[in-house]
Amino acid sequence: MDVREFVDYLHARSEMAGQIAHLEEIPPRGAVYADPEQPLDSRLEGCLRAKGLWPLYSHQAQAVDAARRGENVFIATPAASGKTLGYYIPVMQTLLSDDAATALYLSPTKALAQDQKKHIDDLFAPEAIVRSDFATFDGDTPASDRTAIRAKARLILSNPDMLHVGILPNHQSWRRFLANLKYVIIDEAHLYRGVFGSHVGLLLRRLRRVCLRYGATPQFLMASATIGNPLKFASLLTGLEFSVVDADGSPYGGKDFIFWNPPLISPNQSTRRSASAEATSLLAELIAHGIRTLAFARSRRLAEVIFVHARERLLKTAPEKAALIKPYRAGYLAEDRRLIEKELFAGRLEGAVTTSALELGVDIGSLDATLVTGYPGSSASVWQQAGRSGRRRQRSLSVLVARNDPLDQYFMRHPDLFFGGLPEYALLNPDNPYISSAHLLCAAWEMPLSTREAELFGPLFRKNLDSLVRRGLLKERLGRYYPTADISYPAGAISLRGVGGQEYTVIDGGSGALLEVLDSATAMFQLFPGAIYLHQGESYIVRSLDLDTRIVRAEATDGTYYTEVKDITELEVKRIHRSVFIRGAAVYLGEVEVSVTVIGFKRKAQYTEEVLGEEPLSLPPQRFETVAVWYEVPDSLAVSIHGDLDLAGALHAVEHAAIGILPLYALCDRNDIGGLSTPLHPDTGAATVFVYDAHAGGVGIAEKGFDIMVQWWEATLRAIEECPCESGCPACIQSPKCGSNNEPLDKAGATALLNGLLGVTLSGQ
């Protein structure tokens, strides 16, 4: 059965047809070819012809031409469009024409860099480039190989973490490589957002600074899924100007894309069957009908659960197929993962269940269908996962299975916004004072800083320098800034995944192995005693939290529940940056101090959401300064709501729904956002709703909310009004991370409040 027949089969089955919220039929298209403006080296062109990769697609040629003109290039085209040739061709051309030239490839994961090494070894024949010139350099590189790599390698494939802790702090040993660095390739660039992206943005400025010392000014070549702000994003990430290539010239076999909404179990409460249960059923049906499928799950545990249950179904319905599916995830031994990849590529497997480990560019050959279990947080990720099927130009099928979540349900009702709307903005903030100060300290350790470097590090450079001097971390001498005597190797103490502050070390209590290092703001919400903590998709239960040593001990668990904290949040306005009025509602963007105290937690069943128990906690409050957007409800509107409805419940419901909807516009996760609502806030003297970046210093999310406030209100109102529940549910106004147990909430009051705020249009600024 082909995918079109399977879609017809779903429509014909009454018990399944009702779950098809939308079917988008994406037509096929032919390739658009183009020749480079200048001929390539004959050895390089010969490699491409031998592999059937000539002529080039139009976007590949456009990227090659821009790079050879000396421009920084951002290639933002869909999955499987051949972006890699757009950056590898100019690199290989340069390595062939300049015997000393070097290039650096950076990917967000070690696995992707290692896969790319295999890819370029296979693609570029020995007669074009000597294979030993290519090397991966990461935490898994044997110590015995590192000296030779530093001495000889011309193309190094690595990751930001190794650049941060291994290469830049030891740049003298890398002088040959850095002095001749012509290109820096940044793959899967859309993943460098939020805190991680802000760190990487400053890391790349440190790289540019060290290269400049050795006389090099490398070009940057970036590849990304489609995002809404490619030029601004590339500039924020690197501090440089870019040319964008986003017109895809690759051929496409077409796709049937289904939005699948699990059936309602309790219509009054809008309770739906779980997305993982629906994905299990669909996977078994697809495999039974001979459609090779890759299913994506949000965690390792869910990937394993979907695999086990799908195999059980196949043993009953198509037993000959049951052994032809496997789970695939990080955490497996590398040889096991490679074996599964080979079996998929060779067609020996009918399917696999994976986490986002296979979202990135690892080539696994031809697949007919992809299942995406729950909206993964961005349309870019949806398209990346969906793009894993149909990679060989045949028509394919993708299914997005919705969770009972505001954003998932919003797309089920408004698929046009997904298929026809603008992609989200990728947000980062290299001016975040906490992150910037950390990297200035690293930069000073690499070589003394000068006040003349403000252009490289941004407008807050001098302010952050002065702060580091006052804190006794830097000292100034003759206009240059040096680390103080007690500062040694600061990069080793700074994680690219967190924001400053005191860090907590998570230890596997069984093996003693280091699991992760988290900043204090995150630790209190994820690492309290009794918490179920996910590390790379595996579940651990926290056994102890030592506040003095900041050591957390956790043990692996097979528990079928998860934990949610209960907390109390307080917020103080520090300063206002921008303001605007919508009728009588004042809307602000500014800096706030947030204080959150965890007072307990709940244990909830993974699939039924049943509360299994509650425990009290006594932990110190966590305070951090961040950026918030907030609005004051006009007195007349507040009074009208208070007369018939619950004002506090209305404000709280709007806060929850707005947080759930904001990722529609910003490439972020719901957990990156916090909020507070109150009928009377002491700093505003009015009923106020606050939404803030849940990371110290902010990463740009609140700013985006301020810029699109009216759209945000409108989308929030639609999400609440269109939800079929009577009084509120997880698909509209309830939040899985609410510290006050989702009380009070008033759905009718929220509707009245938003209708009141949307009474007029923007009047001034």
Image (cartoon, grey):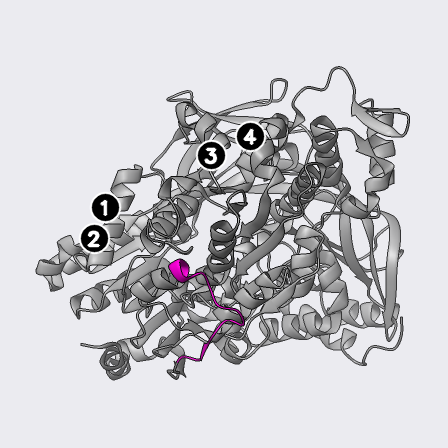
The span from disc 2 to disc 3 (Cα, nearest Å) is 35 Å
Amino acid type shown at disc 4: Gly
**Callouts 2 and 4 close, C-beta under 8 Å:** no
In percent of the image, x 70 and y 64: which residue is there? 650
Q: Of helix, strand and loop, which one carries label 4?
A: helix
In percent of the image, x 49 and y 50: which residue is there? 95
Instruction: Using the rendered image of the protein, determine whether residue 710 is visible from the camera's viewpoint.
Output: yes
Q: Residues within 10 Å of mark 2 (few under 14, many from 20)?
A: some
Q: Which image quarter is the N terminus in?
A: bottom left
Dot 4 corresponds to which residue? Answer: 166
The span from disc 3 to disc 4 (Cα, nearest Å) is 17 Å
How far across and down, in percent of the image, does residue 140 sit? 41, 31
Q: Give the quadrant of residue 466.
A: top right
Amino acid type shown at disc 1: Leu
The span from disc 2 to disc 4 (Cα, nearest Å) is 35 Å
Is residue 257 located in the magenta-colored stretch of the structure?
Answer: no
The span from disc 3 to disc 1 (Cα, nearest Å) is 31 Å
Q: Which mark is residue 152?
A: 3
How far across and down, in percent of the image, does residue 118 sit? 34, 47
Residue segment shown in magenta? 31-44
Dot 2 corresponds to which residue? Answer: 343
Q: Residues within 10 Å of mark 1 (few under 14, many from 20)?
A: few
Amino acid type shown at disc 2: Glu
